[in-house]
Structures are given as structure tokens and as C-alpha cells.
């Protein structure tokens, strides 16, 4: 179908949802029309985010040894990938990671653990770590700890955590094709618990895992329906030793169409060009920022990524600017 881009921009900014036919048409665009689509996405992006880019850094706080069977993940029970494996990092290690994020100019520091979900003592650990970080550095704090109860989420919020990441990962229809040890509904429930606890939701997914265009559209629509505050869009990075090791990378043009779809369906949400952007978007990474307003630097959980210097040069060359942290770090209490 023919797309009326000015009308799509107007309707997106007015909070109207695109039709399924329009969403699929974006994913089916001829490559020569992608620049027009990116310009439309940018018209929507700039209303809320201008030319700002939020820079985030990940810290793998516990690596490998996960009992879940997510087929895409190098840390899962069905993976033979060669990765570093270690237990939960100490407070000192995680605070040192925050120091590195601060020195690298990041806005958000994201601590991630492998596993199904945290024990209460692990919640206490991250609460303690967060209070220490917030006393020293101007950083937004996000944690990704797996399946959470509302009470666990509330404890994290009280310590100063602002965001919880728990991706939907794919559509409800396709979910059991990539994971059987927990369900799509488990993930939805965690996102709801995060919201009820008063935290910001960070939840998106991964494309390139063999899903259909209908699945990609359903994921983007689910993010809209659940009013996700922050939406990471990951592109599968097939890792040797995982069940998806033979999957092919998306083309850069395909990635850009996906980002346009997510932006037009989620006009006021943070859209993050997340894992796999370097190996899927390749030389067109900068163009992704016309739709996305955020990215990770300095690598992912078990794979490398763009270093800070190159990322900042890319942002500057595009005529964009790094988003500053919107608050000052709390000061430690004075000693009597």
C-alpha cells in the first residue's frame, strides 16, 4: 500500500495508532524509500527528544549459569558458547562499574544479572549498591534482574533505582519458539509489577529470531499498549554455541524499517538502538538515531560494542547532542 507520510506523522503525534496494514507496509518498504521513512520518524522523535541522544552503559553483574532456555542467549542453559562465567559481583565491583560509566559520559547505568529472578538478599544487595552509586555519581540507575514481584520492585525504587528492564522479547504468538522455561505472561506480569511499584518500565525485544513481520508488529503494538517508558530494540547477534548461531544478520535497511515502525507506534517513548546494532546496522548506525533517541556504548553482556569515543563522534557528526543527566547526584549525609 502507498503510505502518506505527513498524515502518519500527524496521527502518530496525535496519539493515534497506525493500522496493521500501515505497520506492515513500513516493514515492506522498498529500500529506496527508507530515507523518506526516517525523515517521518525524525519529525515524531524531535517533538519529545529533539536531537538529544541518551547514552547508556551495561554492566553484566552475574554472567552465565542461567537455568532458563532462551535460544538467543549465550548465558542460557541451552548454550555452549564460550563466555566468561562468574557469580554476583560485589558492591565494590558494581560501584566501580558506575564510576567507569560516569567517566565515559553515560546518562544511564544498567546492571544486569543472569537467572530466572532474584532472591531477597540479592534485592538487598542491589538496593545497597544503588544507594552508594547515587551518593557519588549523577547517573540514572536501571536494573535487569529477571522475574520480579511488586514488593521487590518497590524496594528497588525506594533505594533510588529508576528503571527496571524486563523485555517482552517477541510477540505472544512466537514466544514459546524461543523460550519454554517461562512464558510471555510471566514477562508481562513483571512489567505490570514494575509499573505498580512506581518505577519506569524498560521493555522491548529482539528482532531477527525467525519471527514474522506480524510478530514484529505485534511486539511494537504490545509496547504501545503497555505504555512502555523505554523500549530497547535489539537485533539478534547470532553467537556460536547457541541454538540461533546459524541465523543471519538483518540487513541495515531492514533494521531501519523496524526502528521507524517502533517510533511511529511509540512517539513519546525512549527508543533504544540496543544489542546487535553494530553488526546489523553496520555503516548505517548513525541513521538509526533519526528514529531512536538512545543507544548503548562500550559493549553488551557477552559481546563487544561501539566504544565511547566512536559513539560520541558519530553523534556529533550527525549534528545531534548527548543528553545530560536530568538531576544532580544526591550528596552523602554529613557525619556528626
Image (cartoon, grey):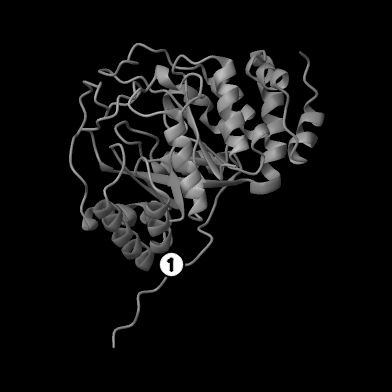
Horizontal and vertical percent for residue 235? 46, 25
Asked whether residue 136 is in view, the answer is: yes
Is 88 situated left or right of 24 in this image?
A: left
Crowding at dot 1, Cα within 10 Å, few <14 / some 14-19 / many 20+, comes out as some
On the rendered image, what quadrant is the C terminus found in? bottom left
Q: Is residue 47 left or right of residue 167?
A: right
Where is residue 123 drawn, in percent x and y? 30, 54
Residue drawn 41% across the image and 20% down it: 176
Q: Is residue 310 above or below residue 323?
A: above
Quarter assignment of residue 17: top right
Farthest left residue? Answer: 86
Where the N terminus falls, by quadrant? top right
Work out whether residue 160 or residue 117 is closer to the camera in this orientation and state it: 117
Residue occupying image coordinates x 27% and y 27%:
76
* Residue 106 visible in this rendered orientation of the protein: no
Q: Position of residue 277 (x, y in %)?
A: 46, 29
**Depicted 25 relative to depicted 291: above or below:** above
Number of numbered labels in the structure image: 1
Query: What SS does tag 1 mark?
Result: loop
Q: Residue at x 53, y 26 (%)?
A: 284
Q: Is residue 329 above or below residue 227?
A: below
Expressed as whole percent of the image width and height from the top left, the position of residue 170 reads: 48, 25
- Residue denoted by label 1: 329
Amino acid at each position: 500500500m502507498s503510505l502518506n507520510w505527513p498524515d502518519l506523522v500527524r496521527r502518530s503525534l496525535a496519539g493515534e495508532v497506525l493500522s496493521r496494514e500501515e505497520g506492515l507496509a513500513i516493514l515492506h518498504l522498498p529500500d529506496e524509500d527508507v530515507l523518506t521513512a526516517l525523515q517521518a520518524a525524525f519529525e515524531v522523535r524531535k517533538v519529545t527528544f529533539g536531537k538529544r541522544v541518551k547514552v547508556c552503559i551495561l554492566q553484566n553483574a552475574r554472567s552465565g549459569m542461567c537455568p532458563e532456555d532462551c535460544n538467543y542467549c549465550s548465558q542460557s542453559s541451552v548454550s555452549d558458547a564460550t563466555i566468561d562465567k562468574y557469580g554476583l559481583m560485589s558492591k565494590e565491583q558494581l560501584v566501580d562499574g558506575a564510576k567507569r560509566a560516569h567517566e565515559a559520559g553515560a546518562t544511564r547505568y544498567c546492571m544486569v544479572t543472569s537467572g530466572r529472578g532474584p532472591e531477597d538478599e540479592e534485592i538487598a544487595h542491589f538496593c545497597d549498591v544503588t544507594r552508594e552509586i547515587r551518593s557519588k555519581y549523577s547517573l540514572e540507575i536501571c536494573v535487569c534482574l529477571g522475574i520480579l514481584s511488586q514488593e521487590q520492585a518497590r524496594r528497588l525504587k525506594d533505594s533510588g533505582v529508576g528503571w527496571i528492564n524486563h523485555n517482552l522479547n517477541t510477540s505472544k504468538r512466537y514466544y514459546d519458539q524461543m523460550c519454554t522455561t517461562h512464558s510471555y505472561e510471566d514477562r508481562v506480569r513483571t512489567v505490570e509489577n514494575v509499573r505498580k511499584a512506581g518505577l519506569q518500565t524498560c521493555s522491548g525485544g529482539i528482532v531477527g529470531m525467525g519471527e514474522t513481520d506480524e510478530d514484529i508488529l505485534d511486539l511494537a503494538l504490545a509496547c504501545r499498549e503497555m505504555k512502555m517508558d523505554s523500549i530497547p530494540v535489539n537485533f539478534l547477534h547470532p553467537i556460536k554455541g547457541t541454538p540461533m548461531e546459524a541465523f543471519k544478520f538483518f540487513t541495515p535497511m531492514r533494521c531501519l524499517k523496524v526502528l521507524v515502525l517502533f517510533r511511529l507506534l511509540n512517539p513519546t517513548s525512549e527508543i533504544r538502538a540496543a544489542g546487535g546494532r553494530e553488526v546489523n546496522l553496520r555503516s548505517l548506525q548513525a541513521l538509526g538515531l533519526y528514529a531512536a533517541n538512545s543507544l548503548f556504548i562500550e559493549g553488551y553482556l557477552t559481546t563487544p560494542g561501539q566504544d565511547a569515543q566512536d559513539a560520541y563522534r558519530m553523534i556529533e557528526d550527525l549534528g545531534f547532542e548527548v543528553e545530560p543527566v536530568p538531576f544532580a547526584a544526591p550528596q552523602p549525609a554529613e557525619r556528626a
